[in-house]
Structure formats: structure tokens, C-alpha cells
Amino acid sequence: MTEATAAELDAADPLAHCRDLFEIPEGIYLVGNSLGALPKAARRYVSVEFDRWATLGVEGHFTGNLSWKDYHHLVSEQLARLVGAKPAEVAAMNALTVNLHLLMVSFYRPTATRHKILIEEHAFPSDHFAAESQIRQRGFDPASSLVVLAPRPGEYNLRPKDVLDTINQLGDELAMVLLPGVQYYTGQVFPIADITAAAHAVGAVAGFDLAHAVGNVELELHDWGVDFAAWCTYKYLNSGPGGVGGAFVHDRHVADPDLAKFTGWWGTNADSRFEMACEFDPIPTIDSWQLSNAPILPLAALRASLDIIDEAGGIAAMRAKSERQIQFFDRRLQEVLGKRIENLTPSDLSQRGCQFALRVAGGNGKEVFEALEEANVYCDWREPDVIRAAPVPLYNSFADIENFVQALDYIVEKGSTDRDVVGKDSVDEPFSPGSDEDA
Ligand SMILES: *Cc1c(COP(=O)(O)O)cnc(C)c1O
């Protein structure tokens, strides 16, 4: 394996055929961590719902095995498999930040002495805002209730031990931990099981944002005892822009009548829902957190992707390929770019997902990124100085990785200020980024 070329690895890849199940923008697409590619079948799944709408109208809510009133349940088992949960513990609903709020309404229950939320310094701003506003909403002050944990000086990643020590130190002042499964900037995998155990040991609740974890790494939320989690589906689950969000509540909590909750008609007993009585009869699953009737078209698109994932052998098969891609990417960066590029992502496989957080030595990363963009190489820029690139096992080939490394080498070597050299008209050698017919 260590000396294998991209072509050899692609020829031996059991998931290579999956690439043809997606429509991928021309060029090298390494931003599935931001917006997953379009599953070809999504057009068909959504079109079926347009047809049902056109022919059945409102009766579509109640007709057939795709009835819209039950449609959200079509994805329960598939989502449960992806996060290591029971179907009664997962729901496709709303969007990520909305779900974080709804779950914090239930799980952040501050008292005069136990009111702190632990987050990390580089939390995605939406998560930071959500935690801060929950604290204010309960009459507390983020200055004293929001604990923001930073990596040690000169380090990019939080040491797992430092996270656990902080939890222990906060002790009975800690109400809740809200941390990522995979950090969106560095790609670091957090030890969810250990963090959950540490939080529980001091009497706190453990919640996770799995935006960059679901569909990327293997998860066992139920067995790990996680209290709650939320994620989006438009990144590694390829559901399309603004796709429906996901949520998890551990089954020891789902029927707890003492949990505060914002409620709506989609959370009450489905058998009596349409009697329109005003007595809330909570569904004894995570469904009782649902508010509104489900967004059928985004769910249809999501189903197309989840079916591909199942057909590919699920997250275990995806992760197995991903680990080979990570090792190949590491090796080629080392061989071709050496010290001209730094990867902030932890080097240990167990502490990283498929995303690389690359920093260009010399500080002209932004120009390098812009030159990559011009050359139809899709990756993304995150301030202050990181190029994120994520080979996704479902549709990225080893050749994509090789081509990315070659493009990066070419641009870094030529000097990215030299725009006319790296403009996309002149870069079909050596990495053939595709035609320049894009709009
Ligand atoms: C992508 C992402 C979000 C985006 O939130 P939305 O509510 O889906 O807009 C939030 N948090 C994290 C960690 C993310 O990676």
C-alpha cells in the first residue's frame, strides 16, 4: 500500500463505482465537508413527490407507503445506523442550529450553582451563539456561565486529556458540555465516549454537534450514553443546500415527562393528532421534539443519498476507504510538498476524519486558495489561514487526491501571485482539472 499509485488504489477500491451515482461539478471536488455532491437519484426521488403532489394533492399526506404524514420515518433506521442509535432515538427535522436550541431547552437546566456550559474556543459560530443565547435566555451571564476551552499555546488541537481535566475541574458548576464530534476547522475527532463519561461523572449533561462527524466517522451514540446530539445532512450526507437537520436523544430521556420542551403538533400522538384536540400527548420517542410537519422535498433528496450509503455497505465500509485515502493523501503531501505545506489535523487516524486543514508555509495561503479556485479545484478557505480539503469516500477517487496534490504543488511552486500562469486556461497539465465550460 505504501508505494501504490492513485490508479492502483482506484482499481482496487470496492466503492469506486459509487462515484457514478453522483453528479459532481467539473474539476476536483473536495468540499463534501461543506456541501456534499448531488446523488443522481435525488432527481428521481424528488420528482416522485412532485408527481404525487400533482396527482394526489392533499391526499398525498395519507396515501400509500410514501404518505407524507409518516414520511420522516422512512429515514429513521438509516439515520440510526449512521450514528449508532435506535430508530426511536433519532429524528430528521428542522435544521442543525434549530435542533441545538430545541435540545438545549430540554437539557440545559441551569441552577444557581450549576449553570456553566463548556464549549471550545473554535466552536462554529452558530454553536457559540446558540449556547450564549441559551444562557442569556435563562437569566444567566455568558461571561460567567460560558466556559471556552482553548488549545495550549502553540497547539491547534485540544488535547483530549485537557478536555477531561477541565470537565473534572468544573465539577458541580458544570451543567452541560457542548462539543463537536469532529471539529469543523481542524478535522480533529473528539473522544465522545470519554467526554460523555467525564460529564456524567460530575453530574453534567453531554451534548454533541455532529455536523462534521455524521457520514464521516463511525459513531455509537447509544452505547456511549450521549444525552443529545444534532447534525446537518447537507455535508457528508449529501442532502442538498439547506437540507433537513438530524437530532438524537438517548432513549433513557425520550419519554421523560420532567424534561422541559418546546412543543408542536408533530410531537403529539399521531393517532389523535388530526382530531385537533389541545391536549399534548407526547410520542414516547424523540418524535415528541418535532414541531412542524416534515419537509418532504428535502427528505426525498436525503433518502436518495442514504440509500446509496446503505448500498455501499454503510459507514464502516466508507470509513475503511476513507482511512486508505487519508494515508494516501498524507503520504503524497509529504512526498510532493514536504515542508511547504503544514497539516493542522491530528496525524493519528483515530483522531481525524477525512478533512485536512492545510496551511501554506510562507503565509500566502489565501492567494494559493484563490488560484486553486480559478483552476476548478474545489476546496475551501477558513480564516485566518486554512485551506480545508476533504476527500469523501463515496465519490472522491484516489486520483482526485493525487490531482489536488499536483495542483497545489504547481501553484505553490509557481507563486500564486503569478495569476496568468495558474489561470485555469493554462493548467490542464499536469493535473487536468476538467474543461473550462463552467458558467
Ligand atoms: C455546518 C455547521 C453548522 C451550520 O448550522 P446550520 O444550522 O445547518 O446552518 C453549525 N455548526 C457546525 C459545527 C457546523 O459544522
Image (tube, rainbow, N blue to C red):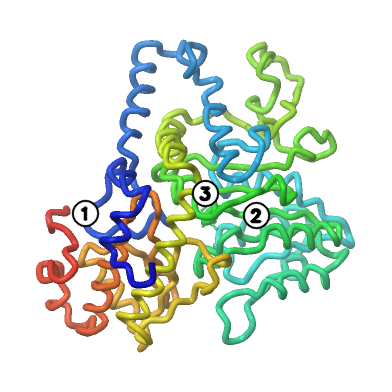
| Residue bearing the label numbered 1 | 26
Of discs 3 and 1, which sits in the foreground?
3
Residue 208 shows which numbered tag?
Answer: 2
> Where is residue 344 drawn, in percent x and y?
49, 76
Q: How many marks?
A: 3
Rendering coords of residue 405 (x, y %)? 29, 72
Residue type at tag 2: Phe
* Residues at marks 3 and 2, CA–CA distance in whole angstroms: 21 Å
Quarter of image, res 284: top right
**392 vs 35, nearest the viewer:** 392
Frontmost of labels 3 and 2 is 3
Q: Is residue 413 above or below residue 127?
A: below
Q: Nearer the viewer, residue 172 or 332?
A: 332
Disc number at residue 34? none
Spatial CA distance of label 1 from label 2 is 35 Å
Tag 3: residue type?
A: Ala
Q: Quadrant of the N terminus?
A: bottom left
- Give the residue type that dot 1 points to: Glu
